[in-house]
Amino acid sequence: MASTRQGDRDRSMAVAQYRPMPLRHGEPPTAMQSLAVISSCRSGEMIYSQQDTAIHWYRVVSGLVKKYAMMADGQRQIVDFLLPGNFFGFTARDEHACTVEAVIDHTVLACYPRQRLEVLADTDPDVGQFIRKMAFEMISRLQARMVILGRKTAVEKVGAFLIEMAERSSTRNTHALVLAMSRYDIADYLGLSVETVSRALTALKHSGVIALASTRRVMIVNRGALAEPRNGTARSGMW
Amino acid sequence: MASTRQGDRDRSMAVAQYRPMPLRHGEPPTAMQSLAVISSCRSGEMIYSQQDTAIHWYRVVSGLVKKYAMMADGQRQIVDFLLPGNFFGFTARDEHACTVEAVIDHTVLACYPRQRLEVLADTDPDVGQFIRKMAFEMISRLQARMVILGRKTAVEKVGAFLIEMAERSSTRNTHALVLAMSRYDIADYLGLSVETVSRALTALKHSGVIALASTRRVMIVNRGALAEPRNGTARSGMW
DNA sequence: CGGGGATTTGATAAAGGTCAAACTGAGTGG
DNA sequence: CCACTCAGTTTGACCTTTATCAAATCCCCG
């Protein structure tokens, strides 16, 4: 599946295997929090749109938000889901490259005036450090997803997605998991069609790797097989 | 190809089309530059490896560098190519998630001790701001690539790649372009097989969208068609 | 108790991967 | 200077994976 010919040459050196990163950022510094304005959104409500001027930075307090790009032909790629504690909306340029909208009702956001926060970041090292760290974490997360998008089969993508969500959810129990987003959203996040996402979930269920309490409530039964379907119970070929 | 059913609902709102970002960062602040140690690498030389401790941050002065992740089965995903002016090596955690190696001989790097640079970022607003901006730009770039990886055909991916390289190269002429990396590298960057990359280039050549002066020297003849192969000369189906 | 979006399932086709082989061109040694 | 080599690239044949089209089913909400 990959171009392994040159890969083979490299493999001896890079012994270690790629692993995504669990990591949680602490609370923002209080100086920063004092700038926040709290607001609540309903499901489907747009926070900002592609090409809007970037006036605010945001943090998800509770709920779920999706960041996506639309293409000329109407195709959509969800670039990220933002969970409680995650930041979004910062950009080096003046306008946003993506659209962001709330996925569920009662999504609560902290909203920071960009100008004032940038000044604060310049003057308060805690704030500067915090923002830097946050940006670095986002880079790590995007890089991990790049690997998933580029080099995984449908079942592996869905498996990786479930693990990612289980780990990023603040729940204690990483084996039970509620998917707040639709199959369509999952598909556009993983670069698959809805049907393929559905079939992958069915395949994982039938092979006993996961169980579905309801369509959106997933129990992770065999975490190892979910992370590495190629050596697990899940047979190759999906059907 | 996408799950357009829900996408249709959204399309009315997101009128604008997604466009990647050309953007060049200026020179780093001199306070920062005074920390730099310059070094030169040969082709294939590893700068750091997955799981190495992150002790330095780097900037490409000249040449070309690739950042990639290896997976358990030997598959490789190139997460980014770094061109002159680009930074790499920063992470929120202690160890690197990716391996970085030079693609061509005489690749020159500026190497910054992480500890000291972080202190400097805390004390010197110019440096803090510069690093923040750099991180934000990298986020933009990764997001743009996510769209390409997730929702494009092989020919579109290769087209987008050529455009990206043409724009990121500091050359005045964005129509002639030298690919310093191999087809294998391009394949692992785009999540394709080498053969498919080669066929896509051939297809673009035959349809007159590009011309190949030699295998690695590309002339962009019809930039519009390269960006939007679906409405261009390039017929769907590739063969 | 509908109604309609969300999800699943099935049949089919297209895109891209894989395997195999030929070709190209830069370096190497005779 | 030329055969030779070998990595990199291209091309061809075939086959797997996933998208697409179509339809059934589920289930949430009024």
Image: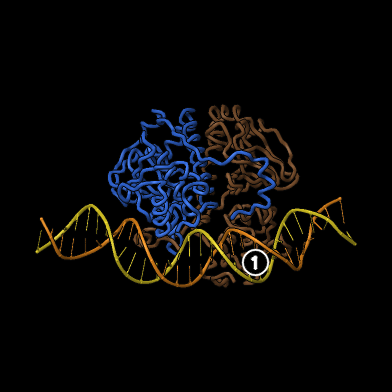
Chain colours: A brown, B blue, C yellow, D orange
Residue named by callout 1: A210
Q: Is residue A71 placed above or below A228 in the rendered structure?
A: above
Instruction: Work out whether D27 lies above or below B57.
Output: below
Q: Chain of mark 1?
A: A
Image quarter where the N terminus of chain A lies is bottom left
Q: Relative to A60, is B75 on the left or the right?
A: left
* Residue name at image x 57 percent, y 72 percent: A233
Q: Position of residue A125 (x, y in %)?
A: 53, 32
- At mark 1, the secondary structure is strand
In the displayed structure, A186 sits above or below A131; it is below
x and y, in percent, of residue A34 in the image: 66, 31
Q: x%, y% of residue B24?
A: 44, 34
Residue sitting at x 55%, y 36%: A91
- Quadrant in which the C terminus of chain A is drawn: bottom right
Whether residue B120 is visible here, answered yes or no, is yes
Q: Quadrant of residue B164?
A: top left
What residue do we see at 65% from left, 66% from top? A210
Amino acid type for the residue under numbered disc 1 = Ile
Q: Nearer the viewer, residue B214 or A191?
A: B214
Q: Is residue B111 visible?
A: no
Q: Nearer the viewer, residue B118 or A176?
A: A176
A43 lies left or right of A76: right
Q: Residues within 10 Å of mark 1 (few under 14, many from 20)?
A: many
Q: How many marks?
A: 1
Q: Residue at x 61, y 68 (%)?
A: A222
User: Observer-nearest residue: A209 or B125?
Assistant: A209
Q: Position of residue B163 (x, y in %)?
A: 43, 43
